[in-house]
Amino acid sequence: MRTCAPVLTLVLLGPFLAGSACAQLIGTPDFSDHTIPTSQVADPASNGWALVDISALVIALGLATYLALVSRSRKHLFLLTLACLAYFGFFREGCVCPIGATQNVALAMADASYVLPITVIVFFLLPLVFTLFFGRTFCAAVCPLGAVQELVAVRHVRVPRWLDQSLGLVPYIYLGAAVILAATGTAFIICRYDPFVAMFRLNGTAPMLIFGGSLLLVGVFVGRPYCRYLCPYGAVLRVLSRFSKWHARITPSECINCRLCEDACPYGAIETPTVPLSRDESRRERRHFVWALALVPVWVIGGVGLGSQLGEPLARWNPDVLLAEQLTAEQFGLAVETTDATEAFRSAGREPREAYLVADKLQRRSRTLACWLGAWVGLVVAIKLVQLSLRRQRDDHVANRSGCVACGRCFRYCPVELVRLGVISDVSERVTEEQP
Amino acid sequence: MRFTPSYRSIVWTAIVTGVFSVMVGSCLVFALDAPWRKLPLEELRFLTLKAELESDAGNERLQQELRDLDVDIRSRYFRQQQFIKRGAYLLTGGVIATLMLVRWSNNVKWQAPDPKRLVTPQGWETRQNQLGKIAAVILVLALTAVVLVYHFSSRQPALSRMIEIPATEQPDTGVDNLQPALAPVLVPTQAEIFANWPRFRGPLGSGFAAFDDIPQTWSSTTGEGILWKSPVDLPGVSSPVVWQKRIFLTGASALKREVYCFDTDSGDLIWTRSVAVRDGTPAETDVEETTGFAAPTPATDGQRVYAIFASGDLVAFDFDGNELWSRAFGPLDNPYGHASSLATYRDRVIVQLDQGNGDDHKSRLLALQGATGKPVWEVQREVPASWATPVVIEFEDPPRIITAANPWVIANAADDGRELWRAECLSGDVGPSPIYVDGVVYLANDGACVAAIKDGGRGDVTKSHVLWKAEYGLPDICSPLVTEELLLLVPSSGGLASYDRQTGSEEPLWEQDLDVMLMASPSLVGNHVYLIGENGRSWVVKPHETGFDQVSENDLAEPCLSCPAFQPGRIYIRGKQHLYCIGNR
């Protein structure tokens, strides 16, 4: 199997290289009688496809939930993963997806004139509702981004818990930035930096292709790196899943603490029983917890301070601000050449002052929102530190409710499950007496 | 371990599909890099034909050839696109098949783990949580560093500061209300600066004029070469500065200060503005007679003109003569009278206010906002009064301001005033200004030395960056001038002295007398040096390794202590009573 890794490395890059071929435009003929066609506005997407998409999502979520929680069939979950990858990924080309829909919702909440399609609302809300009741069954088999990573996760390496915990902060920060940038109409960065959409569409820019290819290569060894350390929608699902009413379990009934499943999860989501602490250790833990709690406001205020420095750079992501800057630079001879945007602006008979006005409003709004973003980052870090100081007593091997994606990989490790399936008649066939 | 035949067959199939995928991938990589993937408009043959047709528009054979080639290239291009697309599908299928087979083989050989190897050590979770906290904090610190670097780096480029919109509340509607509050800050480009004469001794303060057709002969007695001359009401030794069609000049007496704006074409006085005495400024200022009350040369950034007087009054006017702001720095503790000229950096005005004895913390260097006069930064200088003018080097990174005073030559960052380096070279009363040429700072001062200092380094660079020093032919007022090979000095005894600018030497290469004292620093146009004596006689000379050849001798018929200003085809010289325009057109 190890010899397959280099092969995988090569073959995984292939589609991306191929995809870059299609991202070019060529001019119309100069010296022929060819009539240049007038630009056509694409027809709006039909409601029929919207209904099909929503139906597919509902069915896929329902099936995933049933397979993860009731029938506990890893095999069928995997087949569903392939089907969802084929439909939501390659056939529907990764759009609409709940991850990107987060930005549409953020923009709609900030801008009343922005119309939110029903498909987007459903795609954003439905996985949240399912997660609140059944855990991350959307991640298990429905999400095409998760599916493509699930497919390549063949040789997992355990990420140290401390690293896993700290990198787990990134999706929340990414979520905050994405919401702020979307709400200001600046950019939909989740879509812009979607690592796998280029593969789904067999098309994309070189940076996108390299980013996606690299993530898949990492994903061969580190399970679902995008889901765990980047996905902003996953960050929301993690929180909701923590409070879910039902959740996928390692064992169908009672854990016998055989420890066979300890290394089963490539996503580091299996929690082992805790060891009782001495009195001194308990006191120290409590002290750390109190300190972490007391420092929450400090982190938030520090975050606001950091965010206050971000207003101007954040505003410069906005094309309208860049346009105003470019117009000014051209006006005073600081820019050697004009850009398509400034040419178009002038051709429309508009005055640069209009652009300054828009840039001014955006800059002022960015300053405020950047402080909110800073506060959010501070809060996220503070909560993480509190969480790491909080010790929960566990007697069994359990799936971490926020980290578990309900993929079902751990099922077959559990002797109790094997007994349920009739593979073995008694757990003693798998658990020797030497084991605890 | 003995694998079942089914496992072997799966692995072999996976290898076959993997190899197939690699082969398809290789073909695609080759196809992506192939020369025939060039876009039709980039084909050399196509471009050549197109160029030929442009020079021979009616050639039907060329037109037909071009049409055929166009169709051929496009057909090939789209065939290739189709090839790549099919290849991409094949490759995707191959990759998926390989992955599925790999997973299948994993399943076939799967065995339950041996838990004995998975013992969790005591206290593992506590340690991991502690490490997790540290890692989270490090992550946040790294993020903070990135944010700060991004923030400050995005502030540096010129474009990022182009739109400086005041924090005052602006109405959301009403575009007409935007001006001037939303007007962008105007910063002169380097090209604009070098096309004008915006400060003492020109764009870099080096006395170098990169203009053509500069006259070499003139005479105010015969009127030869004099395009116009205009009277200047108040005396002063400040030099003219020029921006496009306007010449700015200052004049002052003990009780009166004025700023003048002349028209370059006619010499007409466009406006005169009196500068009022500010509160706290004594009615009279003690100055040495030669220095006078208007020794500092004004400076302009193309939008505003800034002037300072011996009284310490600094004032800014727009080009229409409207006073924008003023600041009173006086009274200045200066035994001869304040003479350091102003300089500008982007939209800021730079003021070198050296005064006192060096121990009384009176000396400072300031950068003020050109639009408002509010200080951007200010640094204290532990130096006594000096009369030199700062040099602003905008194109270095970071942009820097170089100043000279007893005993330090100091480089400060132009953006925030922080000190970059300093070298100890000077002593006594420092009048000549430093110049900066090709990364080397040259300066000279009577009673100290002439020195060449390599720009760069940090802290005290006296021992590491002083390239050479010498002690003869030193000036007390005139600033140095550099030609392609020589460093020229106007010694306090008069005449002209020369050193090899690269290597220096113990004594000057040569020293020639001119029989008259010079107060105006020399200027360089091409390989000709312009020298103006205090009696108004002037010379254009061509220096070389053994001396100089006189090209012309001219007269102004009135004393002159100011440096000339240049524009293409013109020289502006301030005499004791008149402003002269010398030119060929």
Image: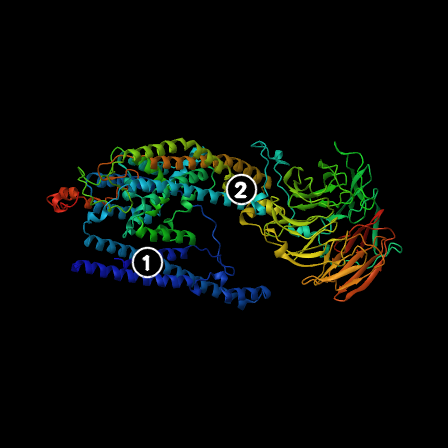
Cβ–Cβ under 8 Å for marks 2 and 1: no
Q: Amino acid at mark 1?
A: Val
The x, y position of residue A55, in whole percent, is 29, 39
**Secondary structure found at label 1:** helix
Q: Quadrant of the N terminus of chain A?
A: bottom left
The quadrant the C terminus of chain A occupies is top left
Both marks 2 and 1 on one chain: yes
Q: Position of residue A38 (x, y in %)?
A: 48, 50
Q: Is residue A114 left or right of residue B466?
A: left
Residue shown at 38%/34% (left/top)? A292
The residue beneath circle 2 is: A321
Q: Residue furthest bottom?
A: B61
Q: Marks 2/1: CA distance?
A: 42 Å
Q: Quadrant of residue A73?
A: top left
| Amino acid identity at mark 2 | Val
Asked whether residue A96 appears in the rendered view, the answer is no
Q: Residue at x 33, y 34 (%)?
A: A284
Q: Chain of mark 2?
A: A
Which subunit holds the residue at mark 1?
A
Asked whether A180 or A23 is in front, the reply is A180
Label 2 crowding class (10 Å Cα cut-off): few <14, some 14-19, many 20+?
Answer: many
- Residue A12 appears left or right of B475: left
Mark 2 vs 1, N-terminal side: 1
Judging by the rendered image, the residue that carries numbered circle 1 is A11
| Residue B409 percent coordinates (x, y) | 67, 50
Q: Is residue B443 visible?
A: yes
Specify how the rendered protein is coloured. rainbow
Element carrying mark 2 = helix
The one of B537 and B288 positioned closer to us in this rendering: B288
Residue B9, how many percent across, how many down?
Answer: 20, 60
